Image: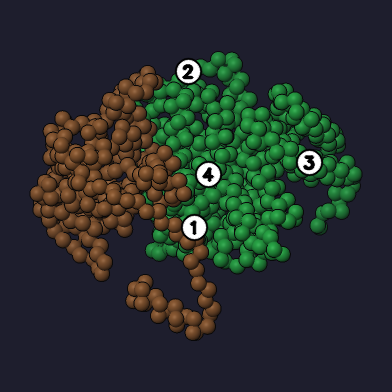
Chain colours: A brown, B green
Amino acid sequence: MNGIKIVVLAKQVPDTRNVGPDAMKADGTVNRSVLPAIFNPEDLNALEQALRIKERYKGVTVTLLTMGPVRAAEIIREGLYRGADDGVLLTDRAFAGSDTLATSYALALAVKRLAPDIVIGGRQAIDGDTAQVGPQVAEKLGWPQVTYAEEMHLEGDRLIIRRRLERGVETVSSPLPLVVTVNGTAPSCRYRHARLLMKYKYARTDTELQAESSDYIAAGRPAIKITEWGVEAIGADPEQLGLSGSPTKVKEIENVILQAKESKRLTASDKDIESLVRELIENHTIG
Amino acid sequence: MANFYTDNRDLRFHLTHPAMEKIVRLKEMDYRDREHYDYAPCDFEDAMDNYDRVLEIIGAICADVISPNAADVDHDGPTVADGHVTYARGTQENHEALTRAGVIGMNFPRKYDGLNFPMVPYVMAAELVSRADAGFANIWGLQDCGETILEFASQEIKEEFLPRFNRGATAAMDLTEPDAGSDLQAVQLKAHYDEARGTWLLNGVKRFITNGDAEISLVLARSEEGTTDGRGLSLFVYDKAEGGVLVRRIENKMGIKGSPTCELVFRNATAKLIGERRLGLIKYVMSLMNGARLGVGAQSVGIAQAAYEEARKYASERKQFGKTIDQFPAIYEMLTLMRVRLEAMRSLLYETARFVDTYKAWSFLSEERTLTKEEREDLKVNTRLADIYTPLVKLISSEWCNSIAYDALQIHGGAGFIKDFPVERLYRDARITSIYEGTSQLQVVAAVRGVTTGGYLAQMREYAKREVRPEMEHLKKQLSALTDAYEKCVAEVTAKSNTELTDFHARRMVEMAANIIMGFLLLHDAQRDPAYTSSAELFLPLAVSENSKRADFIASFEEKELGLYKVN
């Protein structure tokens, strides 16, 4: 098949992998100012899958789609540095506060406008860990969805996907268009490409161009624009977006303090080893 | 995320040296490529930002891919079957990650799919890769061969070979033979022009060829029948796709085990002549070797950095007598002096890279237009400095890399002697640096010219003219006193007009010069960033004691004692 169009769903997230004591604010929301904003790790695995398809077949294009504040344009640039063809930033005050339902509503409308053959996203984002957005987008579009993907390739007009399940590997085949979500166990994303980096480092959205003194960027090189879409561009109903479109309410936040030293000391005696093995089997760590 | 570029402040510090503005402007020829390439920089800041960001990519690959692969690569090594080499799995991954990031061919012009970076960031990349895996650094560093093609080959050869580097082609320089090691004039591999086929054919054997099964090889061969010296040798480029060269065996080495060292057999291998006949050794290989020597300098600094990090980490974790061992004077002195010498050799490395950058940029420009009188003078000065600094970098950094690796292993105690810690690999990898691309003894032969012609002295006097902060004036005075003592010492030796005596003292004099030069460089580093003040202060007493040791020996030495040293 020629001319396949892939949309990669990507999210900018606070890096929750190395959280300190000030990672959460008193009101229970994430303190974004102390956590660096990064490309959601499993979305990078998803991007890698898209780029591999692009390398393998002729005429494939990869478009990054992300929803977030203006600074999430960085995610689009990161995608461009690695080989994506272009990107769309969904940004609008009306999107703020969206839960997974409202987010997938907006993303599904944007996907509809982009009209791709394949949508690939990460399994879940490390800030919310819901794993709902990908499947919800598929439901809203009425497309097949394949989750836990690790590898995929085209065969005729179908996509063959290898899925990593708890007790083994499953290979499935799906017609296009479809939505695939990718596991962190899939191959990690390639590094930025030097030439692409030097080319796209000045790619900007209109809002960014207005915000910064753009004389320098404009001086010597053609401006590379990142598409920015708001509520109107995707024809969304504002009622179904943001807080009003989000049935999820945070009721209470509980601070869990993990004990630093929950360790047990065992000797090399057979008795100790046996009791450890028994304990590990009982709590299903092994076996 | 771990990153070998951003975790070491020295690198950005040297990258942003004030001399870069001129180097980058010359290299980019006033940023004219921006008209033709959408990734070319439009000014100095843009170019510097590119270097910084691309080094960050390489730093990430070094930390996440190359360094974690190093132990397995060292263990598994490459294999040879049916006359060809297969890299260890980790080596393949390393090369693929760098190729995919589009960073190979870093300093080739953009028209050959290069990034057109100056030497300084390229040498920095070599340092980073070496810190991650010194053996793999050879495979990375052999892109230098492209530089030789660029400088001396025909347009046709450039177009055929250079763009292949960025797509991942590996390279080799086939110089050494069983009976031609340090003495390359003895090269025997035969090149003859086959009129019927209209091509050069190579026949013979090469030995100790790093990455000998590469896609693109530069081969030194005897093209002039009946000659016996260097003037009968020419340089050729061989494409593996043409066939005709087989790997007979690969050496089982002590270190840098990931890099295949091959014995090659050439049987009517077709090859293309680079530049003119007879200039192979005397012009092209000399240039190639200078690049390779700077590369070994970078490799040495990278290994030393890795060894220092291992020692620092181990000493901060290992407890004896109720405290971590880095609390004991015997250990913290070692650690601090390792760091100070590391900073000194790194300053020398990048100072040299800047001289190389400057002269190369002028000579490229001179092909386009006539240089002005001042420009020609600048070309001459920088060529001369690059010539005398390159052997100095190779000598000092390889020797110090060995002693830093030695100390790093010593700090590990018994644990360093077993294979559980990376330091034993670093110790083995370090050992080759003072041997290949010209032994330390041969670097002294090249460097002593800087002593006898007054080249080093002139540069020391030049450094002394630069202003320093009042509180560091005493360091500058001490360095000037060291310079005077060095001048006197050299004068005493050369006054005897005895070549053998000069050769005998050569290493001592060269090392004295190196200590003074590094002292000045650290002093200047401290002017630019006060964080380097303590290094300058710590280095000087070392330089003073090291130099007086040598000066004392030379002063008390009598010519007739030479005889006592002779072994026959």
Q: Residue at x 24, y 32 (%)?
A: A92
Give residue B429's position: percent from left, percent from top: 58, 56
Give residue A52's position: percent from left, percent from top: 26, 49
Distance Cα–Cα, label 4 vs label 3: 29 Å
Distance Cα–Cα, label 3 vs label 1: 37 Å
The residue that mark 4 highlights is B7
- Indicate the secondary structure of the residue bearing disc 3: helix
Q: Chain of mark 2?
A: B
- Mark 4 or mark 3, which has the lower sequence index? 4
Amino acid at pointer 4: Asp
Looking at the image, do the residues carrying marks 4 and 3 touch, with CB atoms under 8 Å apart?
A: no
Query: Is residue B308 placed above or below B13 in the rendered structure?
Result: below
Distance Cα–Cα, label 1 vs label 4: 19 Å
- Pick whichever, B542 or A78, lies toward us: A78
Q: Both on one chain, marks 2 and 1?
A: yes
Nearest to the eye among marks 4 and 2: give it. 4
Amino acid at pointer 2: Arg
Q: Residues within 10 Å of mark 3 (few under 14, many from 20)?
A: some
Q: Is residue B546 left or right of residue A247?
A: right
Q: Both on one chain, marks 1 and 4?
A: yes
Q: Is residue B185 left or right of residue B543?
A: left
